[in-house]
């Protein structure tokens, strides 16, 4: 363990908390709930930092066309049922409202907006969390920063030459801006299907994926979910970057997929070779012209602020044992890899809170033993 001398110098002006939770999306709030339930008070016991200006996490950034009727697989936060919402209400309004009520009901006292830019080793077994709103020292850290802030667009030859519009699906705000256009949608997951289902009604669409999509005619099952989680868990246990689970789950018959099929938008093309100023070229010589590219190509974990701790394995990912970083048992990652789903985030939040509470209890036991030993030696 290498102590950061600069971090040690900055400890004097830092606030102290047993645990710092970074991120107040599903995973971060679940962790905070269980820390509170285990007797840790907000402030000195645990501190939740969130970069967003208001509650809601990634849900606040969903396109307005995503309604509650189209939200599938959302699991309520622990200790508070999801209230009834009108099916046509935008998820970007309903779910942040629910998150805000949850924070208030459980007195989680989330500090925002606070953007963490580094976590360092501060000595004496503590970590220093540095942000644009101050510093905190902590005995343990629960990282729940998710992926939403790191949209991924693959490097493609000719991308800089394309004269049309390019955007990631995280910046998609509805089909109306593509009316009468020709649109290329890249990606094989649920986001790509959602975009296709909407844009195909007003635009001429093309769909491109790296691998042939696997369509499922049956609904998503718990068994399929467990298989997907197990696949991702094997990767993070091996220290590899988390991967998409679409190859395990396939594409179930959601309303979006059925609508895209009805509109004839599911005729998939393989990945093109390069972009041109007007469109794209495939390896077999095929060319297509289009006005816009929507990259529904997923996200990468937001963990750059943890770089000073050197948690990454040679495989490129952060190796985990459950939620605990193998390289540093004080650090837990929730909403990462196998816990990236809403139900997985709930479970990971609880597991991390339990493990952190045990770590703190062990520290207290060691401190008492040291005090007793010192007292005995002084008496003697």
Image: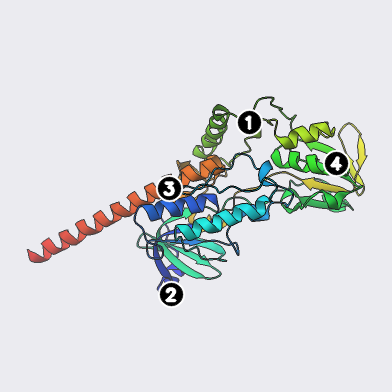
* Whether residue 147 can be seen here: yes
Q: Which residue is mark 1?
A: 249
Q: Quadrant of the N terminus?
A: bottom left
- On the image, numbered disc 4 is attached to which residue? 201
Give the structural element (helix, strand or loop) at label 1.
Answer: helix
Report x, y in % for residue 77. 50, 48
Q: Mark 2 near mark 1, Cβ–Cβ under 8 Å?
A: no
Question: Residue placed at 67% from the left, 30% from the top?
Answer: 250
Circle 3 sits on which residue? 352
- Give the spatial CA distance, label 4 vs label 2: 57 Å
Within-10-Å neighbours for mark 1: few <14, some 14–19, many 20+: many
> Do the residues under discs 4 and 3 have CB atoms within 8 angstroms?
no
Give the number of the disc on residue 13.
2
* Mark earlier in primary sequence (4, 2): 2
**Foreground label between 4 and 1:** 4
Q: CA distance from mark 1 to mark 3?
A: 26 Å
Badge 4, how many Cα within 10 Å: few under 14, some, many 20+?
Answer: some
Left or right side of 179 for 112: left
Q: CA distance from mark 2 to mark 1?
A: 49 Å
First reached walking from the N terminus: tag 4 or tag 1: 4
Q: Is 52 on the left or on the right of 90, as rendered?
A: left
């Amino acid at each position: 363990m290498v102590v950061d001398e600069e971090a040690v110098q900055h400890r004097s002006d830092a606030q102290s908390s047993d645990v710092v939770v970074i991120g107040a999306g599903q995973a971060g709030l679940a962790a905070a709930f269980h820390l509170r339930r285990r007797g840790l008070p907000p402030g000195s016991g645990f501190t939740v930092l969130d970069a967003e200006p208001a509650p809601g996490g990634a849900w606040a950034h969903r396109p307005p066309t995503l309604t509650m009727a189209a939200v599938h697989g959302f699991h309520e936060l622990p200790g508070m049922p999801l209230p009834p919402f009108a099916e046509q209400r935008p998820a970007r309004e309903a779910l942040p409202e629910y998150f805000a009520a949850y924070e208030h009901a459980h007195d989680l006292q989330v500090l925002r907006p606070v953007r963490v830019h580094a976590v360092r080793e501060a000595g004496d077994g503590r970590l220093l969390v540095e942000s644009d709103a101050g510093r905190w020292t902590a005995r343990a850290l629960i990282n729940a920063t998710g992926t939403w802030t790191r949209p991924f667009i693959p490097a493609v030859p000719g991308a800089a030459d394309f004269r049309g519009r390019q955007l990631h699906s995280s910046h998609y705000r509805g089909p109306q801006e593509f009316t009468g256009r020709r649109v290329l949608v890249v990606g094989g997951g649920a986001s790509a299907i959602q975009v296709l289902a909407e844009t195909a009604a007003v635009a001429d669409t093309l769909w491109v994926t790296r691998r042939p999509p696997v369509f499922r005619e049956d609904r998503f099952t718990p068994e399929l979910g467990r298989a997907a989680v197990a696949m991702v868990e094997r990767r993070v246990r091996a220290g590899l970057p988390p991967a998409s689970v679409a190859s395990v789950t396939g594409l179930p018959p959601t309303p979006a997929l059925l609508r895209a099929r009805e509109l004839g938008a599911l005729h998939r093309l393989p990945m093109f070779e390069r972009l041109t100023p007007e469109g794209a070229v495939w390896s077999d010589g095929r060319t297509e012209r289009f006005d816009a590219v929507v990259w529904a190509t997923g996200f990468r974990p937001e963990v750059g602020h943890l770089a000073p701790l050197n948690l990454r394995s040679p495989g490129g990912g952060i190796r985990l044992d459950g939620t605990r970083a193998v390289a540093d048992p004080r650090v837990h990652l929730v909403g990462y890899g196998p816990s990236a789903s809403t139900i997985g985030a709930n479970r990971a939040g609880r597991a991390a809170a339990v493990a952190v509470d045990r770590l703190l209890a062990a520290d207290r036991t060691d401190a008492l033993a040291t005090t007793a030993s010192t007292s005995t030696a002084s008496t003697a």
